[in-house]
Amino acid sequence: MAQLPKSFAMVLSRRYRVYFNPQGDGWYMAYHDGRSRQRESLGVRTRPEAEDAVRKFDGVGSVRPNAVLYKWPEVQKLFLDFKTSSDKAPATINRYKSSLNAFGRYLETKNIEYARDVTLSILEGYRAYRVQKEKCDVKTSYNDELVIKGVFKWGSKTSRGIVAVNPALDWETPEPVKPKRRCYTPEEVAKLEVGVREWLRPIVITLAWTGLRIAELIHLRWADVDLDKRVLHVRVQESWKPKGRRDRVVPLHPKVEAVIRQQSIGVYVFMGPNGGRIKETFALQCLKEDQRKLDLPEGDLHGFRRYFATSMLRAGVDTETVRQWGGWKSLDTMLRYLADVSVKESVEAMDAAAQRLAAS
């Protein structure tokens, strides 16, 4: 069977389609010059050489005397400054920074100093570097790739003039298929509610029965709690914004109401072991230490959010209500949090359904 020709597109001053002819003269390009379609041989055999040849043909391969050349750290700083001025949450800015720092390390291994020298083939090698060389999770690399794509899309706007072209335009970044993260079982949560260290117990109970993210719990103020109406408010604050950047109301489960009534009155509802602000990393470290002591599988703080969504739906709460309580943007996002149904639970659900149908 004849091998299908390889091809890719580049958008410079015009759009070029570049093809590879294994039986002919290698790579060639096709473009429209405003009057008719043109075809030019590039006279090269490798894709990187073809990309360089197209750039030179278009006139962007050589730098104009007055052109500004941006090094990658400069592009990174400009992008982060722009996003900060766009009122992005500090946690989001830190995530962007981490991804761009990783890409900077990758460019150093390729001896690339300027952003304009980044090509599609360079971008396509990033995942292998991040996963194989830096031993990071493939999902982390995928998230990095989305940020990097955003930078080049942002920088290639004509009015900015940071990069002449967007090399990531045809960069394919498929989302990795990974199994669902483990969800706590009711038995595990029950053990944790009484078995973790004293200052951590109210945190575990509140996370498990409100679906709050740990950052939302840390920033929960007494002004956000209405014990008379039995609700708490997740609110956008001047110095902090919840993920999704919107307010929501969460009703108080009896366990959570009892826990909140026992907390000391101050600015924030939940405090650390020494009366200071809770540190997420320290809380996670303590949780894992206590899980080992209780002979339980290690889990994370976000696992209680998965437990909450699963428990509420199995208790008969409709999906839209659970979505609003948890602050998920869409049902699809929320459904990814649900625990997989075990064989035992599946059989029990079928038996219960059969009994209801027989009685109707």
Image (cartoon, helix red, strand yellow):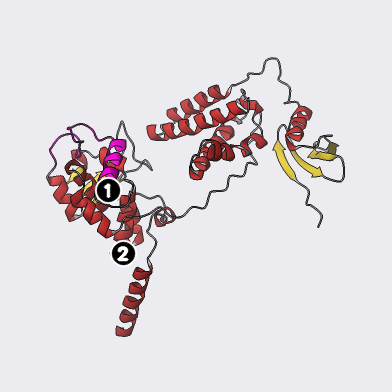
The stretch in magenta equals: 263-291
Which residue matches tag 2?
314
Q: Tell me what residue is drawn at x 60 percent, y 28 percent.
A: 109
In depth, the one of 14 and 61 nearer the eye is 61
Q: Amino acid at mark 1?
A: Gln
SS for dot 1: helix
Q: Is residue 169 or residue 300 the one in the foreground?
A: 300
Which numbered disc, 2 or 1, marks the residue closer to the eye?
1
- Whether residue 206 is visible to the viewer of this picture, yes or no, is yes
**The N terminus: image quadrant:** bottom right
The residue carrying mark 1 is 291
Q: Is residue 199 left or right of residue 212?
A: left
The answer to whether 243 appears left or right of 131 in the picture is left
Q: Quadrant of residue 154?
A: top right
Task: Using the rendered view, name the quadrant where residue 311 is placed.
Answer: bottom left
Going from N to C along the chain, the mark reached first, 2 or 1, is: 1
Q: Is residue 269 magenta?
A: yes
Q: Quadrant of the C terminus?
A: bottom left
